[in-house]
Amino acid sequence: MGLEITIGVIAFVLGAGLALLVYTQAMKSRSKKMLREAEAEAEVIKKEKILQAKEKFLQLKSNHEKEINARNQKILAAEN
């Protein structure tokens, strides 16, 4: 009877240890996957923000050039 209890306890401890090992590995795998997904999403956001900044720069540059051209036209008109 004592041997059966001992074997039962050992089996329980081994089973719990194995379950803990499997659970730990699953959580590591899940966390790595989540990290990869977050990095990919961050890269997409980064590219979008860079594109938005470039578009804004081109818009500001275009507006600035229009203002300069308008001033130059006024100066030429005043000279004539």
Image (tube, helix red, strand yellow):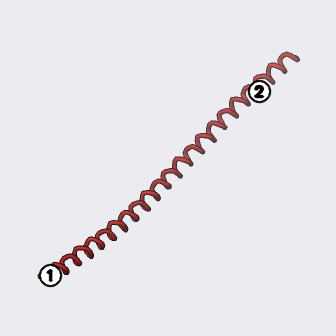
For the residue pair 17 and 6, the one nearer the viewer reads as 6
Furthest-bottom residue in view? 3
* Residue at the image point whose x is 52% and y is 47% from the top: 45
Residue 49 found in image quarter:
top right
Residue 64 found in image quarter:
top right
Question: Mark 1 is on which residue type?
Answer: Gly
Percent x, y of residue 7 = 19, 81
The 10 Å Cα crowd at callout 1, few under 14, some 14 to 19, many 20 or more, is few
Would you name the residue on which mark 2 appears? 69
Would you name the residue on which mark 1 appears? 2
Question: Mark 2 is on which residue type?
Answer: Asn
In this rendering, would 52 be left or right of 18? Answer: right
User: Which quarter of the rendered picture does the N terminus lie within?
Assistant: bottom left
Q: What element carries label 1?
A: helix
Furthest-right residue in view? 79
Residue 80 found in image quarter:
top right
Furthest-front residue in view? 2
* Residue at the image point whose x is 28% and y is 70% from the top: 19
In this rendering, would 22 be left or right of 32? Answer: left
For the residue pair 34 and 79, the one nearer the viewer reads as 34
